[in-house]
Image (cartoon, rainbow, N blue to C red):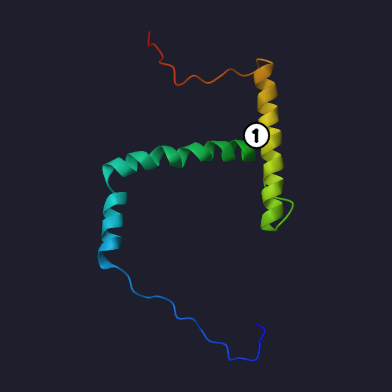
């Protein structure tokens, strides 16, 4: 750390907490409504990243800085979207119209 002629002073952290805030938050998170909201979100993104890892063998980034990793992933995402658009335009995949009900014979 560079000194500019003055003594370095530490800034104290706030250590106080509101006692009811944590309990209220925990109660809200554990409510049935919030659990139902949380469940689909936990599954949705995993499918995309699992597909990227398993089907396209993407295991690690070539760069380490945050800016370069962001650019690399955006280029990868653009390429993936272009591939998906190409497959859609050539009728290799169909538009998703929701879950279809299956009839049991």
Q: Position of residue 45 (x, y in %)?
A: 52, 39
Quarter of the image that includes the N terminus:
bottom right
Q: 4 or 43: nearer the eye? A: 4
Is residue 58 visible from the viewing direction of this image? no
Q: Position of residue 67 (x, y in %)?
A: 69, 55
Residue at numbered disc 1:
55
Q: Quadrant of residue 90?
A: top right
Compared with 69, 100 (above or below) is above
Q: Position of residue 82 (x, y in %)?
A: 70, 29
Residue at horizontal 67 percent and vertical 24 percent from the top: 85
Compared with 100, 80 (above or below) is below
Q: Residue furthest right?
A: 62
Q: 79 or 99: nearer the eye? A: 79
Q: Quadrant of residue 15?
A: bottom left
Q: Residue furthest top?
A: 105
Q: Quadrant of residue 57?
A: top right
Horizontal side, residue 11 vs residue 25: left or right: right
Residue at horizontal 49 percent and vertical 19 percent from the top: 97
Compared with 25, 45 (above or below) is above
- Count the labels in the image: 1
**For numbered disc 1, what is the local secondary structure?**
helix
Residue at horizontal 66 percent and vertical 27 percent from the top: 84
Horizontal side, residue 39 vs residue 50: left or right: left
Horizontal side, residue 93 vs residue 42: left or right: right
Please tell me how crowded label 1 is: few (under 14), some (14-19), or many (20+) other residues with Cα within 10 Å: few
Quarter of the image that includes the C terminus:
top left
């Amino acid at each position: 750390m560079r000194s500019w002629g003055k003594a370095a002073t530490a800034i104290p952290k706030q250590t106080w907490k509101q006692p009811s805030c944590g309990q209220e938050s925990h109660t809200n998170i554990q409510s049935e409504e919030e659990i139902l909201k949380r469940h689909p979100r936990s599954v949705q993104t995993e499918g995309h990243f699992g597909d990227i890892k398993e089907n396209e063998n993407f295991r690690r980034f070539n760069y380490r800085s945050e800016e370069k990793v962001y650019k690399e992933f955006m280029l990868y995402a653009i390429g993936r979207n272009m591939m998906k658009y190409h497959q859609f335009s050539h009728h290799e995949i169909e538009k998703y119209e929701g879950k279809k009900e299956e009839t049991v014979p």
